[in-house]
Amino acid sequence: ERAEALKAEYGLTKAQVSANLAELLTQVEADLLFDCAVPEVHAEITHLALQHGCHVLGEKPLAMTMAEAGGMVEAARAAGKTFAVMQNRRFLDGVIRLCEAIRSGLIGELTTLNADFYIGAHFGGFRDEMEHVLLLDMAIHSFDQARFIGACDPLSVYCHEWNPAGSWYRHGAAAMAIFEMSNGIVFNYRGSWASEGLRTSWECQWRAIGTKGSIYWDGHELFQGETVTGDDGFFRETAPLDIPTPAPLANTGHAGLILDFLDCLRDGRTPNTIAADNSHSLAMVLGAIESAETGRKLLFA
């Protein structure tokens, strides 16, 4: 009924609606499937789509477990199809600007990434009852951003999760996590979905620290940076950094990722959110949850 209502609302007169995905895929002879369903059925939908010869672009998170994710990735490889994940933060101008500034060497070798996420989000509905609501439903974005910005993958994590007094969520509205990453980088995440006042952006506030300076991005438009210019004194002399602004993306966010995915299919390129790579971002989420539940530092395989 909901699908029929949306079909009518948007005037999609040629769209077909069915409660049986397998039958529908056979009828329309689809080439591509967009999976916007709840995470619990991502694996089932992806396997079915691949069996019907479809490329797949799935909503985050990739899967509920690493075993599920591995099976989905292997099925896509065996089918010779492209399977990628919706990580729309990689297609934001601010994220690209921070990436390019770091990779250009403006602050020397990157050593530390800090991300702060503080938003008092009153969703109502299923999120209010979810376990690990911040880590499961939101932190995947920030963790994937960290991998993208730092060009690094996780080695270990220690995470503490709690539900602050006054929280309207049942479980896990706040968390702090320390990740040891490849390339000698440490990524620190602090987040809360029950934090009223002084909201950060949905993309987090970021501080990147390198061997020669630091860059701050507020997640909106503000970029600040300083680099060391002196070599003596208790505080070394610094100078402001001119952080270049790359040409704006033609399409950003969800639209940018979807259009790039289609271009990749046409051109034979690999999307930068390909599921085989995105499994590292999923591992960060599941690893943080396991660390929070056990109270122990977790090493990634």
Image (cartoon, grey):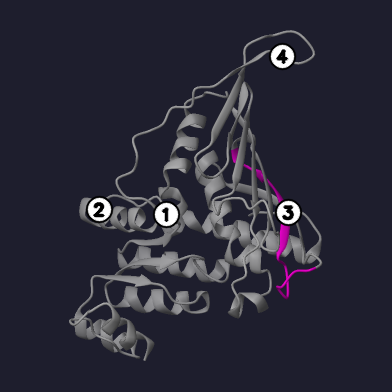
Give me the residue at 53% from left, 52% from top: 144
Task: Report the amino acid beneath label 3.
Answer: Met
The CA distance from mark 4 to mark 1 is 40 Å
Compared with 105, 62 (above or below) is below
Tell me, yes or no, if residue 151 can be seen here.
Answer: no
The CA distance from mark 4 to mark 3 is 31 Å
What residue is pinned by disc 1?
A: 273
Compared with 123, 188 (above or below) is above
Please state which of the two labelled residues, at mark 4 or mark 1, is closer to the viewer: 4
- Quadrant housing residue 9: bottom left
Mark 1 closeness class: few <14, some 14–19, many ≥20 residues within 10 Å: many
Q: Nearer the viewer, residue 257 or 292?
A: 257
Q: Residue 15: horizontal and vertical position, in percent?
A: 22, 81
Task: Report the amino acid beneath label 1.
Answer: Thr
Residue 139 falls left or right of residue 166:
left
Q: Which residues are magenta?
A: 166-182
Task: Report the amino acid beneath label 4.
Answer: Arg
Compared with 4, 147 (above or below) is above
Task: Report the amino acid beneath label 2.
Answer: Asp
Mark 3 closeness class: few <14, some 14–19, many ≥20 residues within 10 Å: some
Q: Residue 108: horizontal and vertical position, in percent?
A: 57, 23
